[in-house]
Amino acid sequence: MDNTLDKVIVVKIGGATLGNHDTTLEDIVQLQKQGKSLVVVHGGGKRITQWLEKQGITTQFVLGERVTDPPALEVVTAVLAGLVNKEIVAAINTLGGKALGISGVDGALVQGKIKDAQLGLIGTVTRVDTTPIKTLLAAGYVPVIAPVSLRMPEKAGKEAQILNINADSVAGEIAAAVSAARLIFLTDIVGICDKQGKLIPRLSPGAAEALIASGVASAGMVPKIRACLKALPTTPNTRIIDGRQPHALLTELAGKGSGTTIGVTNE
C-alpha cells in the first residue's frame, strides 16, 4: 500500500455538529499534531437551504434528496465549495493546524454520473482519484473536501458538468478508495437506534441493511449506513457517533467512544 495513505482516518462532519461550542476542529488539529493522517469530508445542507431561501429558490425533495436544478446547483457549489469549506479550513488553520480546502471537482478527485433524472443534477460516484489526497497528505495538510463533484463529458467537445453528491456517500467512496483505517461519521444523534430508540452498539452488514429495509433506519441515516457498507471491504472500522459530545473525536480514537460500529459480526 502507498505509505502516504497508510492508516488514513476519514472523518465526515456536517453542519448539525459544527456549532459555536463544537470541539471537532480542535480535535482534528490535535490529532494532526499527533501525526495522524486525516481526511475531512463535510456537508452543509442547512446552510444550503438558508441560501436558497435568500435567493428565492424553492427547495423540493424527492425520496429524501434535494432536487438540484441549475440555479440550485449554483447555490450548492457556492455554499459548499466556497463558504462552508473555507470556514472549516480557516478555523483549522487558526487553531494551529494545517488544512487545505478542495472540492470533488478539483483534480477530478470525485467523478460521478446523474443518479436519477427527476433529481436533476444529483450524482452518484463513479470514480475517486486519490492523487490529490496523497499530494496534500504528503505535504502535511488535512484535505478538507466539499462533495460537489465532476461529471466528465461523455463525448469530445462536450463540457464537463458539476454535480451535487451526498456528502455521506462521498465520504464512504473516499474511505473505500484510500483503504482507510477508519471511517467516522460525526452526527447529531447518539448513533443508530432500534425501533424503541435504544442505541445499537454494533451491527453486521446484514443487520444494517435490514434496518433500512424495515424503515427503522430512515432519512439521513440511510446514506451513512450505505457509506459504511461501501467502505467495509477495505476499511475495517466504520463508526457512526454523536459529534455533539465534547471532544467526541479524541474520545473515539482513544477507544472510549459510544455510538454504532458497522462491521462483520455473528448475525
Image (cartoon, rainbow, N blue to C red):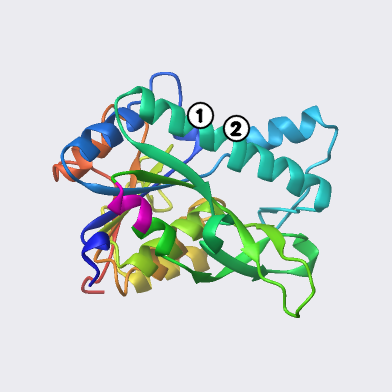
72 w.r.t. 235: above or below? above
- The three-letter amino acid code for the residue at tag 1 is Glu
Residue 151 in the image: state x and y as whole percent.
Answer: 67, 67
The magenta stretch spans residue 136 = yes
Q: Main SS of the magenta segment?
A: helix
Q: Which residue does the image show at 36% across and 74% down from the upper left? A: 206
Q: Which residue is mark 1?
A: 87
Asked whether 137 or 260 is in front, the reply is: 137
Give SS at disc 2. Answer: helix
Pointers 2 and 1 in contact (CB under 8 A)? yes
Residue 96 in the image: state x and y as whole percent.
Answer: 29, 26
Q: Which residue does the image show at 77% across and 66% down from the upper left? A: 159
101 w.r.t. 29: above or below? below
Q: Quadrant of residue 150?
A: bottom right
Q: Which residue does the image show at 14% across and 42% down from the upper left? A: 254
Q: Tell me: 196 left or right of 245.
A: right
Q: Disc 2 and disc 1: Cα gap in Å? A: 6 Å
Q: Tell me: 257 left or right of 111.
A: left
Label 1 environment density (alpha carbons within 10 Å; few <14, some 14–19, many ≥20): few
- The three-letter amino acid code for the residue at tag 2 is Leu
Residue 29 in the image: state x and y as whole percent.
Answer: 28, 33
Residue range corresponding to the magenta coloring: 135-139
77 w.r.t. 19: above or below? below
Q: Which residue is mark 2?
A: 83
Asked if residue 18 shows in the view, the reply is: no
